[in-house]
Amino acid sequence: MSTKEKILETALSLFAENGYNGTSVEQIAQNVGIKAPSLYKHFKGKEDILNSLIDVAEAHYEENFGSDKNVGKISDNIDDFIHETVEKIRFTMCDPLIRKMRIFLVQEQFRNERLAEITTRHQIDGIQKMYQAVIERMMQKGILANGNSALLALEITAPVALLISKVDRQPNSKKESLKIIRKHLQHFFEIYKK
């Protein structure tokens, strides 16, 4: 791991633990094992570190989870869809970068307008848009009955977001939460399949 990557990893851990304002450049450098002036060889300052962290996390999330612009292959059957969706949710719950970033964003969303927008996009608007596009394609394929795709996306994603938040607060609930999510998805398709 490069020094730049160590700085980002350390900064994210400190931001998630202490908040953005509660973390200094000196703390980051000390935890990396370098002097603060050495950190400035890689980043202009704390805000530059934050911006880099956001860019890295966004690219990682897009690549591994997707978005409304990148929904990926749409399953031809409900069982495959549920399996693929649960794997995406497992990634969201368990990936260390995404989990730390989510915890950090949840704390900081009330202090920083930009971080509030990113949190809303990842936890509500963006995920709903992605699943609205997925549901529309499943309707076109004849897997789901026609309906209001925006409301169906809200219906499928809202309980999942709540359970992911629960796992963030209570990591021991991961197994049970994934079980509930799988049941939720099965129930959704029992109601809306064509």
Image: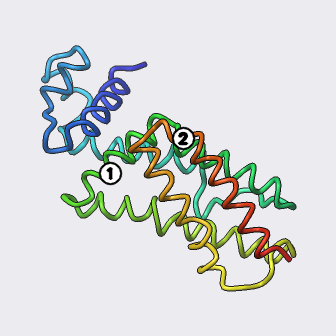
Q: Quadrant of the C terminus?
A: bottom right
> Residue 4 sits in which quadrant?
top left
- Give the mark, 2 or 1, whose residue is nearer the N terminus: 1
Residue 41 in the figure: left or right of residue 156: left
Measured from the top left, where is residue 21 in percent x and y? 14, 44
Residue lying at the far bottom of the rendered structure? 147
User: Dot 2 surroundings within 10 Å: few (below 14), some, or many (20 or more)?
Assistant: some
Residue in the foreground of this view, choosing between 58 and 129: 129
The residue at the point 44 percent across, 37 percent down is 97
Q: Within the image, what quadrant is residue 20 found in?
A: top left
Q: Which residue is mark 1?
A: 105
Residue bearing the label numbered 2: 174
Amino acid type at circle 1 is: Leu
Residue 86, percent from left and from top: 67, 49
Picture residue at 47% right of the left edge, 69% below the top = 125
Image coordinates of residue 183 in percent, x first then y, are 70, 56
Q: Is residue 40 above or below residue 92?
A: above
Dot 1: within a 10 Å radius of its alpha carbon, few (fewer than 14), some, or many (20 or more) residues? many
SS assignment at label 1: helix
Query: In the rendered view, would you say 53 is above or below 116?
Result: above
